[in-house]
Image (spheres, rainbow, N blue to C red):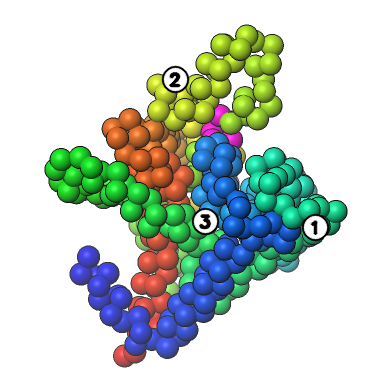
Amino acid sequence: MKKLFQTLRNIWSIEELRAKILYTLLLILIYRIGTHIVLPGINPTTMNVGTNSNNGLLGLIDAFSGGAFSQASIFALGIMPYISASIFMQLMTVLVPQFQKMQKEGDSGRKKINQYTRYLTVAVTAVQASAYVAYLKQIHGGSLLPAYTGYFWLSTVVILTAGTLFVMWMGEKITDRGLGNGTSLIIMIGILGRLPNSFINEFQAKSTRPGFILIFIIELAILIGIILGCILLIQGTRKVPVNYAKQIVGNRQFGGARQFLPLKVNSAGVMPIIFAQAIMFLPTLFNLTSLASTETKQGIQRVFTDHTSVWYMLIYSFVVIGFTFLYTALIFNPKQIADNLKQNNGFIPGVKPGQPTTDFIGAIMDKITLPGAVLLAVVGILPGIAQLLGVTQGFSTFFGGTSLLIMVGVILDTLQQIDRDTVVDAPV
């Protein structure tokens, strides 16, 4: 903590770091202003903000966009289409040999992949914008201006696509010239944008109960404890010792150092929770229970939409654990790590190079991924548990799930970059 305060005191004494922070804050301010600009053709005074966008994928999009989705903003789709395109391209680099080869080409290959990601973002945004127009007509049909009805679909698709591309551009600019990962920061700011209202609503809900101050303080203490647990989950690693063989070139000796190979307990990050939320929403999206009776249909729909349901938590936990193993297997390649160690004359003590090293690393990953997946599932169901204990729905989302993991992860990464820049650029 003392180190953190020392870092914050040194920030404004470093001109380059100060410029990065101010540039980042400027673009974030522009983004937040844009989230409150309503699409042309809609009367904002008659809108019922927040209707039917509290759960499932709609709630996830609304959370990532900072409420812009429910407010029919020009940034309603936010950065989500770009994230979807990036995830798709990331999977392609794992599954398609042509993209694997492109990724290994260095900067030129990464530039090609980034360009393909941008093109795919345009297509994804156009499709999602068309679906969003139908959603607006269903939810906010009474707020549409009659004189603008003939142009509403075309103008909305164009504006939403341009808005998403502009948000994507701001994220890239923050990454290049600002502080931290721009895309992650924009998502985090959108999530934090809901915190003040959620905090106030929770306080007002508790104010009618005797001893509400103590109850509210206990809730905040539990929230801080959960945040500390998420920090441990995100930064938890298993250090595998690695030795490098000595090399003598002339009169100089190289290598011989003992280092560690850090294997993360949660290599999949927040992706399993996002995938699980999407899967849990599919039965209600496609009405898979149309052949069942009305009572059965309502029961199944309640299981997949009620976050406080025991069945929802169980199914959700199993889906998160399954996706954690699947996504870790896709992004983590033990054979590539073993080959890199062999090429750099590195070896794990007591393990032969080559396939034995691959099997050893893979076995360790399987062992540490299981507790990581279980903890990730627990974090995912914490908002539902918080609601069962009397926390309001809006404030409960900060007790776990996607929102908390993203906030903690982004804040940690940003603080680490500030710390590095402070050490590098600090005046002597």
Q: State which quadrant residue 171 falls in.
A: bottom right
Q: State which quadrant residue 36 falls in.
A: bottom right
Q: Secondary structure at mark 3?
A: loop
Side (left or right) of 90 relative to 48: right
User: Which quarter of the figure is the N terminus placed in?
Assistant: bottom left
Residue drawn at the location 52% of the way across and 72% of the way down: 29
Side (left or right) of 61 relative to 149: left
Q: Which of the two discs, 2 and 1, labels the residue nearer the N terminus?
A: 1
From mark 3 to mark 1, how far is it between C-alphas? 27 Å
Evaluate if marks 2 and 1 touch, with contact meaning CB atoms under 8 Å apart: no
Q: Between 101 and 220, which is closer to the camera in this rendering?
A: 220
What residue did someone put label 3 on? Answer: 66
Is residue 94 visible in the rendered structure shown here?
no
Give the residue type that dot 3 points to: Gly
Circle 2 Cα neighbour tier, 10 Å, few/some/many (<14 / 14–19 / ≥20): some
Residue 148 bears which disc, if any?
Answer: 1
Q: Which of the two discs, 3 and 1, labels the residue nearer the N terminus?
A: 3
